[in-house]
Image (cartoon, rainbow, N blue to C red):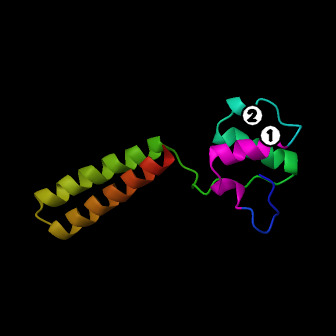
Amino acid sequence: MAQDNETAKPLDKMTVKELKDVALEIPEITGVHGMNKADLLSAIKQAKGIPEEKSRKKSGSIRELKQQVKVFKLKRQEALAAKDSKMATIYRRKISRMKTKMRRYA
């Protein structure tokens, strides 16, 4: 898979098979066939001297998000009891967004 840098697709977008082909061409990397995509990416980047980028995910834990979801669920129940449908809808949407964040972190 000898490609020049202008036509090569970024390492992060390559499949595991393509990454294994690239890694096999680099003599410093051993145990290519037993590696997963994350291991292959880090090994190739280290061998080529490419700095690793940090994850785009915000710092925060799933535990904190679950606590916030519980709080918003209680507030939503209070809003429903007070027949405040506008606030109940707002809390429902916030809960939905937080659950989406949790799925991304997992």
The residue at 18%/53% (across/down) is: 77
Q: Is residue 16 above or below residue 51?
A: above
Q: Which residue is mark 2?
A: 32
User: Residues in magenta?
Assistant: 9-25
Percent from the top left, x then y, of residue 72?
Answer: 30, 54
Q: Label 2 sits on what residue type?
A: Val
Q: Amino acid at mark 1?
A: Leu
Asked if residue 98 lies left or right of residue 11, the reply is: left
Residue 17 locus on image (x, y percent): 65, 43
> What is the x, y in percent for residue 68?
38, 50
Q: Quadrant of residue 91?
A: bottom left
N-terminal of the pair, mark 2 or mark 1, is 1
- What residue does disc 1 label? 24
Q: Residue at x 61, y 57 (%)?
A: 56
How far apart are the two marked residues, 2 and 1, measured between alpha carbons? 7 Å
- Depth check, front residue: 45 or 1: 1
Residue drawn 81% across and 64% down?
A: 5
- Decide: marks 2, 1 in contact (CB < 8 A)? yes
